[in-house]
Amino acid sequence: MVTEYGKLPEHPESYWRTAIEFPEFPSLEEDIQADVIIVGAGIAGITSAYLLVNEGLKVAVIEAGEVLNGTTGHTTAKITAQHDLIYDEFIHNIGRSNARLYYEANMEALRFIRETVDRHKIDCDFSQQDAYIYATTEKYARKIEKEAEAYEKIGIEGGLVESIPFDIAIQNALVMKNQAQFHPTKYLVHLLQIIKEKGGLVFENTTAVNIETSEQPVVLTKEGARITANHVLICTHFPFYEGAGFYSTRMYADRSYALAVKANKQYPGGIYISADEPTRSLRSVTINGEEMVLIVGENHKTGQGIEAMEHYKALEQFGEEVFGLKEVVYRWSAQDLTTLDKLPYIGELTSGQPNILIATGFRKWGMTNGTAAALLFRDLIMGYENNYEKLYTPSRFYAHPSLKNFFKENANVVGQLIKGKLDSPKTKPEDLSKGEGAVITLDGHRKGAYKDDEGKLHIVDTTCTHIGCEVEWNNGERTWDCPCHGSRFSFTGEVIEGPAEKPLQKYNYTMLDNLTSEDSGY
């Protein structure tokens, strides 16, 4: 159907969140105790809970919204150790042995998912696929050649190929054999059922806001409940509690976009990603018994760059050129975090704090990295040996990439903060049409305004409640997005994604309010 959005659906909706019955869980209304409290019900949190109830521990999982409605519910759902062009870079920055460990950790995660699917006979469209990264320019063709050399050095099964089965003019490509794809929410809903059967507790609409640190840490919730445990696992995408880890300064948030399309041309199998920018990622997906194509890409920092709908349109144009599009069935976007050295942070929140563990910074490869995090958590809590503990530890520091990127990313934050404070928008509330949002000036103050389909105006202050940067309007999702650390808010100001914990305010909110508020980002 063609609308004012072209072939694009009017509203974003992830296919992984449709045509599946999600279990419902209560909110937590009283104090409880557990061996392990897991904050966040995505792939890292749910897999951790599954592993730990199998060890006989009393486990409780809390989720601020609904289970599987965050990054895991908006993934591309490739299960692969081919994470862009990364192994040549890792060999140079962290050494050949660590690059090999990263590959092994992700392949171990792939094997775990395959074995879990087989063991429980989970109907989740799991299929083995070869993974390809391809170059369309001479510059990236040379980089792929370097990556192929890295594969050989660390023993990755694969190598250079000259063509891929698409109408895309490429210079070369690199294959990694025997990778996979699946339906992530079907897989994880099954694990939730097992967790429940084994006595695990799951609570939705229960927001963690702080931790009282002691021998037995206590998670404090927005709703007033206290959860005491021997171990706390922070699996909340952006950590809701940073302690002295300063994670806000050590990561940046990045968005990407996805279309599920009916194509004129049959999909040839395999999973693909471009080395060149803008990124193009491809895989098949079965929807209502019909094979369709998932087209993903258009990465950019959250709250920065062109309007979101332009990214969807670019993917639509790419799909039309390569496949010919009958229909765009779904569109959605996702957000992920990248660390200073591109390795996830998995382990002790801060050095010497073994009872509070964190998993974050999966760099858009959460299916394997999130599973690897859960396996590492299990081993740390149970006292088992794990070869990847030092590789992933958040207290590591690799001087070459980390120091350079620390200054680069925090200079970007400062630049966005100053830019937002100097912005003087000319738009006024009466200028908005129905369904339109924009930054406006109201009584001399910078505000965010959205006029809904009934013509009602929703006005919020644009100062993010994390550290005080100015949010920008996202017309593709109808949200307010922060360009500094990736917090996202609904058009009414409610928090969709942290690190902000407090909604956008209706009054003239300032950075001073952040400095003096107990529940701000400071």
Image (cartoon, rainbow, N blue to C red):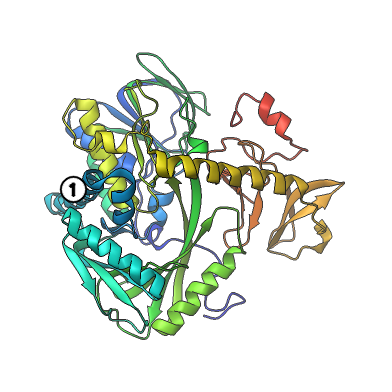
Rendered position, 422 above or below 161: above
Residue 372 percent across, percent down from the top left: 26, 43
Q: Quadrant of residue 351?
A: top left
Rendered position, 140 above or below 60: below
Residue 86 percent across, percent down from the top left: 33, 55
139 left or right, relative to 373 = right
Quadrant (top left/top right/bottom left/bottom right) for the C terminus: top right
Q: Which residue is most to the right? A: 443
Q: Residue at x 70, y 39 (%)?
A: 505
Q: Which residue is most to the left? A: 119
Q: Across the whole image, how many numbered discs are drawn on residues?
A: 1
Rendered position, 56 above or below 178: above
State the residue in front, 415 or 515. 415
Kind of residue at badge 1: Glu
Q: Residue at x 34, y 65 (%)?
A: 143
Q: Quadrant of residue 34?
A: top left
Q: Secondary structure at mark 1?
A: helix
Q: Residue at x 66, y 26 (%)?
A: 517
Mark 1, Cα crowd under 10 Å, few <14 / some 14-19 / many 20+, is: some
| Residue 195 in sight from this viewpoint | no
Q: Quadrant of residue 193?
A: top left
| Residue 322 in sight from this viewpoint | yes
75 left or right, relative to 101 = right
Residue 85 percent across, percent down from the top left: 34, 60
225 left or right, relative to 52 = right
Residue 207 percent across, percent down from the top left: 49, 33
394 left or right, relative to 311 = left
The residue that label 1 is drawn on is 108
